[in-house]
Amino acid sequence: MILRFVNDIGIFLNVLTLKICDRTALYKYLSATCNRSFIVEKYLIKDLMVPISEYATVSEGATLFEAYLALEKAQEEYDHNKYRHRAILILDKNNRVIGKVGQLDVLRALEPKNEQFEMFEDISKFKFSSHFIMSLREQYLMQDEPLIDICKKTAQIKVEDLMRTPTKGEYVEEDTSLNIAIHQLVRGSHMALLVVRKNEIVGILRLTDVFAAIFHTMKECGLDIDSDIDKNIDKET
Amino acid sequence: MNALEKLFIRIVQRVNINLRELEFDARPYVWDLIPKNQMTKFYAFYGITPDHPLNLQFRHSGLAGSYFLGQCRVSNSLLYKCDVRGDELKKKGDKFQFKNFNIPVSKDEEIVIEDSAFVKTLIHNYSHDPETLEKFFIKDTISTHYANIHGAPSSGCFLGPFSTVDLTTMRDCIIGTFSYVQAGEISHLNIDPGTVWVRSPDSFNFLYHYPLKKLKDYIYFEAESLPQGIFIDFMESRKEDFQRVFDVVNIEPYTNVPTTASLDRYAVIKPKTDIGENVLISQRAYLENSYLGKGANAQENCFIINSRLEGYNVTAHGAKIIEADLGQNVFVGFNSFLRGQPESRLTIDKESIIMPHTIVDIAEPLTIPPGQLVWGLITNRDDLETNSISISELSKINTRYSKGNMFFEGSGASFVSAFQGRIHHILEANGAFFNSLDNSGPGHAQKNQNMSFNTIQPYPRGDQEGLFPTILIQP
């Protein structure tokens, strides 16, 4: 019954977020509702991750446009699913990952960067309402230059000016159990984790792949979940 | 290291502990600001009159060149050329209105300064914090040149040069250079230089940010250097004029002061200055070739030069008016700097409000129409257009408004009413409406007349050099 509603990713993540905070409850929930398999046993990080050799990478010094071309190439060469790759890794001279440019980073780069616009951010600490601050931003953006011109300029920005350096919580060892990786994704609201083997990044574990694995597991034992939940409801009533 | 240096280190440490969340280190900013070798050079002094309470207590403190009035306790602190005026404090039995609370004051209020260091700072008014009505506390706080702590209890704060905190309780905050804050209560905030923020929760919120590049010409302060800029140059250029009034014990009184007016003995008055009825001229004010009409006032650290004030003008603490003509009831806020030129005078028509920390510095003549609210940096007509609004127009605003670097949200009418009410209160408290026929409405202009001053001195040498012995001064 519950799976009929879980096809919305937002609802699913809410369920996951609530449950991951209480690990015992999550185990109990999954064990109680699915006897045939358990996700931690069934899926390994190395099976779910995208190997770094298949991921979009550029060297530092590249422009954002060059990074986009690398992303496009990675998708064409390694992946038939159009929207699978969502970020580009930035490598230093020794081919070590030094940063990451995601979709949000690119969009953030389109935002105006001047004293006036930044002031709108700053005034929030002076207790102005969020409605007021939003209206100031909207007013400013209405008068800003056309989006096509902003895109042209942004395409020439060096990736190192946009990239984010991954935080500690964005790395996961290859042999770490999947439930720990899930915890890292949820707690840090990350879209992906960098998978490490002997201090070397060997792949990327993406939220979308983890989601698919969990969803698949639940779907596999969907009938059991339905009947168990119905039983529980009967007991409670 | 003598006791004074140890004390200074202790104060800096206490401020840093309070500001650790903001990752602020006060030491490189202030170590050279208080001239430790000059702490023996200047006496401290206090005023006595029959109209003011007298309860001064000093313990383990340096007080060089500082002035005290009323009720004040200072311990473990360094005050260099400061004014601490405890003459507007609440008295036992007074009632303090805060929102729906009518709170009785249980004992005479006092200013209590502990573990703090101030340079050329003005401290006065009374605590507006309903939680601490009887104690206007300032502790673990450092303030720098020409800052104003006005009715603003403070704990663990740092105030940059020419900053003002007004009627606001502050905890663990940094107030940037030339920033003005009147916001009721603030904590753990780092206020950038050149911020003017006036907020009354649930009523209105006004904010202006100075363009920092331009502000730096006027005042600039960074670690390991002294404050610099036009403001400092201006003050330094008139320093010698004050030297005489502080050096001479019995100064020759300035004639032609009406009996209803008050001219402080520590003010500088230069020729062709004309003082009207009910005028108040506070100490460290500087007047030169100017006219002050009935009920006008020049508060501490004000400079009025080659200017004409038609009457009932408030020139708040630290404001400077040069080559300007002000109509009646013009208010000039804290630390404002209004500078015309001999051939390009600044005219401010009646009933205009110059917001605290406003700079009007012009090379061409400029007239501000009557009934305007003016803020920020103005150097020409275009700036005036961007940084002003008519008070009647502002009164109609009931949602939000922005213009240039100014942001306003809330009720314009409440904002105008609050300002006008306060201006009226200041004039009243200063005795501007005093009627000599029935002796009604006396204020500072009348009460401060014939004040006596006593001086106190620090240890001249030895381990305690520059510190004052424990001193209790009571009736």
Image (spheres, coloured by chain):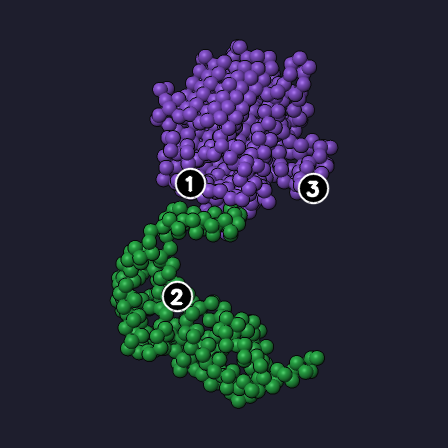
Report how far apart the C-alphas of labels 1 and 2 lie in the structure: 38 Å
Checking the image for residue B349, the label placed there is none
Say which quarter of the image contains residue A194: bottom left
Q: Quadrant of the C terminus of chain B?
A: top right
**Image side of residue B170 versus residue A98, left or right:** right
Q: Which residue is mark 3?
A: B100
Labels 1 and 3 positioned on one and the same chain: yes
> Would you name the residue on which mark 1 appears?
B404
> Label 1: chain?
B
User: In which quarter of the view is residue B261 placed?
Assistant: top right
- State whether residue B210 appears in this view: yes
In this figure, which residue is indicated by the disc labeled 2? A166
Q: Which kind of residue does numbered mark 3 sit on?
A: Asn
Q: Position of residue B116 (x, y in %)?
A: 54, 39
Q: Residue furthest bottom?
A: A36
Instruction: Report the number of numbered marks.
Output: 3
A41 vs B220, nearest the viewer: A41
Q: Nearer the viewer, mark 1 or mark 3?
A: 1
Task: Name chain A's colour.
Answer: green
Identify the residue at image location x=60%, y=17%. B449
Secondary element under disc 2, as helix, strand or loop, is loop
Amino acid type, label 2 = Pro
